[in-house]
Image (spheres, rainbow, N blue to C red):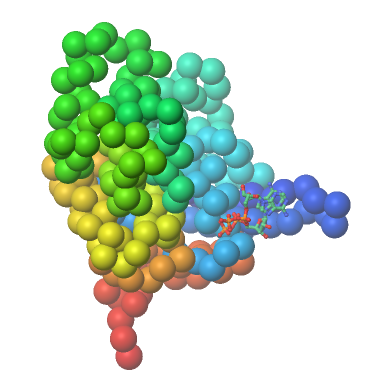
Amino acid sequence: MIQLNDVTKQYKTSNGPLTAVDQVNLKIQDGEIFGIIGYSGAGKSTMIRLFNGLEKPTSGSVIVNGEDISKIKGAKLRNARHKISMVFQHFNLLWSRTVEDNIAFSLEVAGVKKEARKKKVAELIELVGLTGREKAYPSQLSGGQKQRVGIARALANDPEVLLCDEATSALDPETTDAILDLLRSVNEKLNITIILITHEMHVIRKICNRVAVMEAGKVVEQGDVLQVFESP
Ligand code: ADP
Ligand code: ADP
């Protein structure tokens, strides 16, 4: 479970403090698909950096699986971070590596032996629907295929949470739907919590259970998607 208790994040700027996240309370349960929606500047990127410990709150606490991640350091913090994996808008693949080597990279870094790596990569390639494209380079893939690699790579180290930062914003509507279907199946098959950050309402409507709406650093509404976005 991820819990934000009265979290405020201020940045120091030449014009004085700027409040990017303003007294936010949020509870994301294990196994749910939770959306955070807002316009540019609403505070979504800051929220991501609070979730994965890259920023410390100015006040309040960020609890990930029972631990206040603004209060832990070193190996404990690295451990907590490993449980949260990122999927990016622009994929962030290694361009000189093949599909399978991109997926294997974090396993290599983690010291996983070659045989175990091969097995894991093969499983992930099947899971994300890239069978036959193992030896392709990113430049030879469509946007949707690149994001499939991004998702497989994010899953390689068995995270508990997938943090998707505008993961479909660079894709056309049809490809967006296919990627969202994939994320839902990942959520169901692997029981992974998914947090989707987006400015697009249809993304939230399509796969999220619950949503928080952000405006100028505040969560102005949160709850079941159907209730929050119910048409009048
Ligand atoms: P997005 O809306 O996709 O977050 P931005 O252009 O707002 O993109 O931000 C890009 C990066 O620059 C982010 O990491 C953000 O935190 C940082 N950033 C945004 N505004 C400022 C600012 N006023 N001063 C310093 N860094 C900023
Ligand atoms: P979003 O991701 O929703 O676009 P951000 O979290 O990037 O929102 O930004 C929220 C506010 O905080 C914006 O006003 C932005 O300019 C500001 N901001 C973000 N990062 C920084 C930073 N590193 N330094 C100063 N201001 C920042």
The residue closer to the viewer here, 9 or 131, is: 131
Q: Position of residue 127 (x, y in %)?
A: 16, 39
Q: Position of residue 18 (x, y in %)?
A: 73, 56
**Which residue is located at x 44 percent, y 33 percent?**
95
How many numbered circles are shown? 0
* Residue sitting farthest toward the bottom: 232
**Which residue is located at x 30 percent, y 81 percent?**
230
Residue 76 horizontal side relative to residue 194, left or right: right
Q: Where is residue 34 in the image (x, y as percent from the top left)?
A: 33, 56
Q: In this view, does 24 lie above or below 80?
A: below
**Which residue is located at x 40 percent, y 16 percent?**
109
Residue 74 horizontal side relative to residue 116, left or right: right
Hey, which quadrant is residue 97 in on the image? top left
Hey, which quadrant is residue 117 in on the image? top left
**Which residue is located at x 33 percent, y 71 percent?**
202
Q: In which quarter of the image is the N terminus?
A: top left
Q: Quadrant of the C terminus?
A: bottom left
Hey, which quadrant is residue 140 in on the image? top left
Residue 49 horizontal side relative to residue 13, left or right: left
